[in-house]
Amino acid sequence: MTAQRDTGASVGPEYDDSEKAAPSRSPFAADADDLVSPLTVVLVRHGVTDMTLSHALSGSGEVGPSLNAQGKIQVAKAADAVYSMGRRSWEHLAPASRVFASPMTRTQETGGAIGRRIGAHVETDDRVREIHFGEWEGLTGDEVAQRYGDAIHQWRFAQLAPPGGESIPQVGERMDSFLRDIAAQHAALAADGKDELRTWAVASHAVAIKSAVGVSLGMDASTWGAIWPQPASLTALRLHIANDGQIRERHVLCVGAPTS
């Protein structure tokens, strides 16, 4: 079972990572002397709920639902995969030392499983919550189409927000704010004499994770819907950060790596 978990979590780049010897340097940055050691952010999608299985829209308009029995097994495996990073897989990374989660029940449960595995308490951040579906909350895609016509496709291509809800670009803005904030925290630790590789985990949601990847790659928001992180999968971003806390480069190491 251990080998199976490690296979999922180790899907990623296999370049000669000279950053192990000089962790403050990006392999591509021309002005790397101004950088602190990189920060890796592992975005973990929560496990399945009954609404996941019924394909109902489950956003941040409701705190629930909870993980179902299958989802709890999935997040236990995801927590093992996060723990393995920097130990038995992804050897060029630091082991995860911090875990964030959105306020939603399913991500609090997911973050709790990760936190217990790595020995960290869950820090709640509202910016990593799922998109707010407004009046569409709890409906399936077919039901939205029946009631609102083509609006769900316009939403999917970032052309509008659901009534009373959020647009996809708005999710991208708050996910970008979160990434910039933790980058500044990482740089502040470096300035305090703790310049070292770090890995921080984030228990989040499908649209939020898509948005983080889309923003990091500079993709147009209309294309973010093509990114599909499955439940309990890992998406890893590596942030190369300047001394002043600004993100200089964002490298997408993997998207939706399975953990079971």
Image (spheres, grey):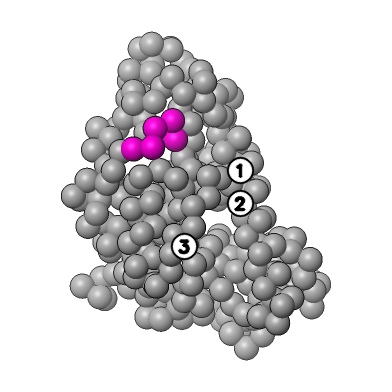
**What element does badge 3 sit on?**
strand
Q: Position of residue 226 (x, y in %)?
A: 47, 41
Residue 9 visible to the viewer: no
- Magenta-span inclusion, residue 223: no
Q: Position of residue 47 (x, y in %)?
A: 31, 50
Residue 95 visible to the viewer: yes
Q: Position of residue 178 (x, y in %)?
A: 61, 51
Q: Which residue is mark 2?
A: 178
Q: Which residue is mark 3?
A: 99
The prevailing secondary structure element of the residues shown in magenta is loop
The correct choice, above or below, for 138 with respect to 53 in the image is above
Q: Residue at x 51, y 77 (%)?
A: 94
Q: Quadrant of residue 88?
A: bottom left
Q: Nearer the viewer, residue 86 or 227?
A: 86
Q: Could you tell me the amino acid type at mark 2?
A: Phe
- How crowded is the residue under tag 1: few (<14 C-alpha within 10 Å), some, or many (20+)? some
**What element does badge 1 sit on?**
helix
Q: Which disc, if any, is residue 174? A: 1
The reply to whether callout 2 and callout 1 are in contact (CB within 8 Å) is yes
Left or right: where does residue 90 sit relative to residue 241?
Answer: left
Left or right: where does residue 92 sit relative to residue 25?
Answer: left
Q: Could you tell me the amino acid type at mark 1?
A: Arg
Q: Could you tell me the amino acid type at mark 3?
A: Val
The reply to whether callout 3 and callout 2 are in contact (CB within 8 Å) is no
Cα–Cα gap, marks 3 and 2? 13 Å
**What element does badge 2 sit on?**
helix
Quadrant of the image for the N terminus? bottom left
The residue range painted magenta reads: 59-64
- How crowded is the residue under tag 2: few (<14 C-alpha within 10 Å), some, or many (20+)? some
Cα–Cα gap, marks 3 and 1? 18 Å
The correct choice, above or below, for 21 with respect to 60 in the image is below
